[in-house]
Amino acid sequence: MGLKIICLMKQVPVPSQMRMGSDGLMDRTKAKSIINVDCTFGLEQGLQIKNRVKDAELFVVSMGPTSFEQSLKKALAMGYDRAILLSDRRLGGSDTYATGLSLGTLLKKLGFSKDAKDPFIIFSGRQTSDGDTAHVPSQVAETLGIPQATFIEKVDYQDNHLVVRRIIEGGYQVLKVPVPCLVSITPTSIPARRPSLKGAIKAKKAKIEIWNLDQIEVNTGVVGINGSPTIVARVVDIERNRPPVKIMEGHTAQELAGRLVATIEQSAESQIPIANEIAHKKADLFKKEAAPAIPAETKPASTGSEFPRVDFRQGARGILTWVELHGKTPARSSLEILNPARQLADQLGTKVTSVLIGDNISSVAQEIIALGADEIIAINDPRLKEYSILPVTSIFAQIIERQRPEIALFGATTSGRELAPRIASRVHAGVTADCTSLKVGEFVHKIRKSVMYPCLESIRPTYGESKLATIVGFCCPQMATARPGTFQTLKPDPARTGTVTEFKPQLKDSDFVVEIMETLREEGGAQNLFAADIIVSGGRCCGELDDFKLVKELTKALQDKGINADWGASRQAVDHGYAPYGRQVGQTGKTVRPKIYVAVAISGAIQHIAGIKDAGKIIAINQDSQANIYRHCDYGIVRDYLDVLPELIQKVRNGFTFGVTPSPAK
């Protein structure tokens, strides 16, 4: 019974080389392709286990065109034994559901199922750079019916199980996961090794095994662009809306810091104070989000199409949301998502049902009702004191079968990003990741010759945050996860009433095979990033050069002046282990809206810009004058942060607070 190790790998286009096609969708045919960076960490993890289990056999598996062979051969050069590619034109346009189903079916055909005689472990990267969904690992695991652990940064193989450390908001969990299982690896794990010369020679002569849909016997009606439950309706460029940056001038760090202070103070005197300016922006945003719309059933066709309008819901009604609980405290993202849920329900003339899962948590129900829910489904079970994906997936599948909601919404936390796609695969639905806007609309389906309504338009940044894609689907429930920090939490209404229903799900022992050995969560500081008036964030070199010492000192100096300030980090800093995931600002971290955002030694990757674009004023400190951050900030200091921050810290100690008024003493 030799151990089998499989790594799922994807070849991705370089985002900067992507171009918009004439059909309004993305054309990747002329873009250079590389191995998805996150996948390289999965590849290395497989090799690490091979170091301990010498007779283990290593497989690398991918899905895509034959051009993917170059990346598969690189994996062979690193030390993998077999490379298998699922390649078929009929797979073109597959969404994550169809991709997970196809890869899972291929693996079953190769003998990797929950009933396999030989033990096996599947590794994957956390997510892919072209989509950033993190869906496929969950969907492959569900297709195979095996346990999973995602966002894993440390793996210890112990014969018939793994002990892994999983990143969660504000901390980590240690899980014991039985084999067979699937594990997705974060870039905070062990970096990939370089191929050896001997390996490269061996790989050059190796033959890639190519499979097609007929060989794996998958139903072609549920894959490809026509079989996928979601499709890309349109893609538009994300436009910059900030005025040109003002670069500070001066010969010394002291002069540059002084110039910044003078510029901000002058701006505060001659224009609307920054605090009021941002307050008005937030108020306008809230009004815009809360504006009611005409119910979809009565809205006239706006497409100009002669096709008949078709309500595809087949009786499905209602909005379902998941309230992620940390003990008895709802995650902020779960409260935020009640905002779009309430709007969608009002548009559709239906109700919002929120699901609470935990131990003795019915007391939380009124808080959720006050924030917009009409009905609470409460599941109380001591075994569910902490979130675990297998039983929660089973519970949701049972609720969806009973309730038949038309829409299901989740926060895009580490838990929501693994849970939603696994549920979607179980109930045969599509799911859109990391949405920043959710609307009701209609779609002209030229193949079906129908105007489909009411569609959930799930809008999300993609292709390295350079584009904004609108995803629609025609299977209920239409599912989406929402980027934390994107939606404002509605003002609580203590007078709101709703119903609370206790639900007793049917759970099996196999739903509890993953053991939670330890949970460490430090909510305080990291959660304050959503409310902070000033955020000071550092890039990777802040960890390398001074372990974020100056970033934290500037934050502390502001706090000592009564300012609600906190510190954050870029994805690069987090991926290299210099800051916890809960501090990460950006597309796959937190979306923040402070009055002042200070980006220290941050290059300005598009994923980071996505998380700070709604900040009132952005100040960049970077010694590289060509850094992308200078295309997205208001004020810039081109200098080594090690020289500038001590000067700014002293300015703050002398009374400078970036134009922000201290918070009232509590």
Image: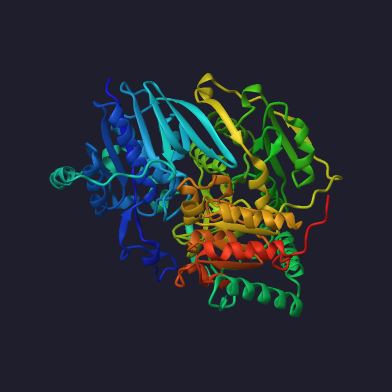
Establish if 88 lies above or below 304.
above
Q: Horizontal and vertical percent for residue 114?
A: 39, 26
505 vs 203: above or below = above
**Is residue 295 toward the left or the right of residue 256 in the image?**
right
Identify the image quadrant of the N terminus. Answer: top left
Color encoding of the figure: rainbow
Q: 410 or 519, which is in the foreground?
A: 519
Residue 78, position as x, y percentages in the image: 24, 43
Q: How many marks?
A: 0
**Near-viewer residue (13 or 611):** 611
Can residue 554 be seen here? yes
Percent position of residue 329, x then y: 71, 37
Image point 59% across, 33% down: which residue?
A: 520
489 is higher (above) or lower (below) than 625: above
Percent position (x, y) of residue 370? Answer: 80, 45
Is residue 319 visible in the rendered structure shown here? no
Q: Residue at x 27, y 34 (%)?
A: 58
